[in-house]
Image (cartoon, rainbow, N blue to C red):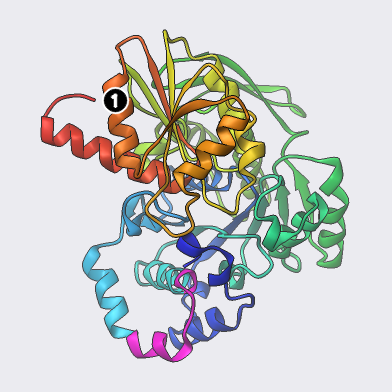
């Protein structure tokens, strides 16, 4: 499993997933698909799109990875996770097939998602790539629209050491005669996407020149924006329950996607319903872990930022949080550029270094050594649960706590906090 052990778990071609899906009657052909790739933001973008489609009356499948707490978070239908007995039955019914083909864990989950969506007769599925694009198991779909959110440094050992190399892997989701939308324009990658689109006779669109977002206000429940369609000079009031500052990039991409889908008649979408959906994304789709406010007083927030670009966005927002003292529970996996990420953390925080319960996790003591060399002070803990417990004991009402570094840290922290809350029957 890549989530646990890293790149050694990856099957570097599409043979297995094709065999699996052929044996399952190619369920991925039973519905329309929106295919999402990118370094950061693809999960939030996928959930935003799913919310828009649900609010417009489409029965919507949503495939994302990894999960935080429950494996079934990876595939939802109209926001609801598939039933546990459905997962058990799928594995039991297809055990011989799985053992014969010997696919990766991720390949099984992709096939499982497509089968669930086909059986549920979804109208549209929003499918997020797991890693890269070209050789990602999800790349057997033929979407009605491909979306690439952005490119930054992550998984260089698998995808390439430069932005153009990484972009080429992401551009692998561009299909012949299928339009592609680029969320953020970057000089280093623009030519890569343009050439890929030309080779595939695919029309290429960019979100950045079309939509602008001006932030008006923020509470612990919503962000408020003026959304401006630059060509038409139309201005829309928009609020969202996604609270990360970085969400404005994803919202802009989704606005461009909605406009593109509707004007090209790929899908009929009511724009007012699309705007309204953005205020209830978490309720409609179950999204967690993106500047996720877990408690207001004292302030506790969790974010799955796990690479330097993602951390930079989170730290910019964390810097502006008012608090008497700031504390951070943090852990990373081994294959990230940990030193570059940690260099962006503020020195005046108290740190609780930890590692998730997976082989791929960077041991807490090693993380502490790297952090100490950068001027970050704190203690190492053997588990996320212990780190969260220690931080909570030290936390005063006027303080603030950030939990970040990986999906696995945030997932285990949410479980620990919810368990503590239930056992004490009190607020955090």
> Helix, strand or loop at disc 1?
helix
**Residue 27 vs residue 235, the one in the foreground:** 27
Q: Residue at position x 49%, y 64% from top? A: 5
Q: Is residue 295 above or below residue 292?
A: above
Position of 7 relative to 265 (above/below): below
Q: Quadrant of the C terminus?
A: top left
Q: Looking at the image, can residue 54 be seen?
A: no
The 10 Å Cα crowd at callout 1, few under 14, some 14 to 19, many 20 or more, is some
Q: Which residues are magenta?
A: 95-107
Residue 260: image x %, image y %? 67, 46
Q: For residue 209, which quarter of the picture?
A: top right
Q: Residue at x 55, y 17 (%)?
A: 319
Q: Position of residue 370 (x, y in %)?
A: 59, 38
From the image, tell me which residue sits under label 1. Answer: 392
Kindly report the secondary structure that dominates the magenta region of the rendered protein. Answer: helix
Q: Quadrant of residue 216?
A: top right
Residue drawn at point x = 30 percent, y = 13 percent: 396
Residue 377 in magenta? Answer: no
């Amino acid at each position: 499993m890549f989530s646990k052990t890293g790149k050694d778990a990856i099957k570097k071609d599409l043979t297995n997933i094709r065999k699996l899906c052929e044996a399952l009657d190619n369920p991925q052909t039973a519905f329309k698909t929106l295919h999402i790739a990118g370094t950061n933001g693809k999960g939030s973008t996928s959930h935003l799109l799913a919310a828009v489609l649900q609010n417009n009356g489409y029965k919507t499948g949503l495939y994302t990875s990894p999960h935080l707490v429950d494996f079934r978070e990876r595939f939802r239908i109209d926001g609801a996770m598939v039933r546990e007995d459905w997962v058990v039955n799928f594995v039991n019914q297809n055990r011989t097939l799985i053992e014969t083909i010997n696919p990766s864990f991720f390949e099984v989950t992709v096939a499982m998602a497509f089968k669930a969506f086909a059986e549920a007769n979804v109208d549209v599925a929003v499918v997020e790539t797991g890693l890269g694009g070209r050789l990602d198991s999800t790349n057997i779909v033929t979407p009605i629209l491909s979306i690439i959110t952005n490119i930054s440094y992550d998984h260089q050992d698998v995808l390439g050491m430069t932005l153009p190399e990484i972009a080429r892997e992401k551009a692998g989701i561009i299909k012949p005669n299928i339009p592609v939308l680029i969320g953020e324009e970057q000089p280093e990658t623009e030519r890569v996407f343009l050439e890929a689109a030309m080779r595939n006779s695919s029309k290429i669109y960019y979100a950045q020149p079309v939509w602008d977002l001006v932030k008006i206000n923020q509470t612990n429940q919503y962000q408020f924006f003026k959304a401006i369609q630059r060509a038409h000079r139309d201005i829309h009031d928009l609020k969202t329950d996604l609270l990360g500052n970085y969400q404005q990039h994803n919202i802009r991409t989704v606005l461009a996607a909605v406009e593109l889908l509707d004007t090209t008649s790929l899908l009929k979408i009511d724009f007012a319903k699309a705007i309204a959906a953005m205020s209830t994304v978490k309720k409609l789709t179950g999204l967690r872990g993106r500047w996720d406010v877990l408690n207001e007083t004292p302030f506790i927030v969790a974010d799955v930022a796990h690479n330097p670009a993602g951390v930079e966005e989170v730290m910019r927002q964390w810097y502006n949080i008012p608090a008497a003292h700031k504390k951070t529970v943090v852990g990373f996996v081994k294959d990230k550029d940990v030193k570059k990420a940690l260099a962006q953390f503020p020195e005046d925080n108290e740190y609780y270094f930890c590692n998730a319960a997976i082989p791929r996790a960077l041991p807490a003591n090693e993380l502490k050594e790297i952090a100490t060399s950068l001027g970050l002070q704190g203690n190492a803990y053997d588990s996320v649960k212990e780190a969260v417990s220690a931080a909570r004991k030290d936390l005063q009402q006027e303080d603030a706590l950030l939990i970040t570094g990986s999906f696995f840290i945030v997932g285990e922290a949410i479980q620990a906090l919810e368990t503590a809350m239930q056992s004490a029957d009190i607020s955090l």
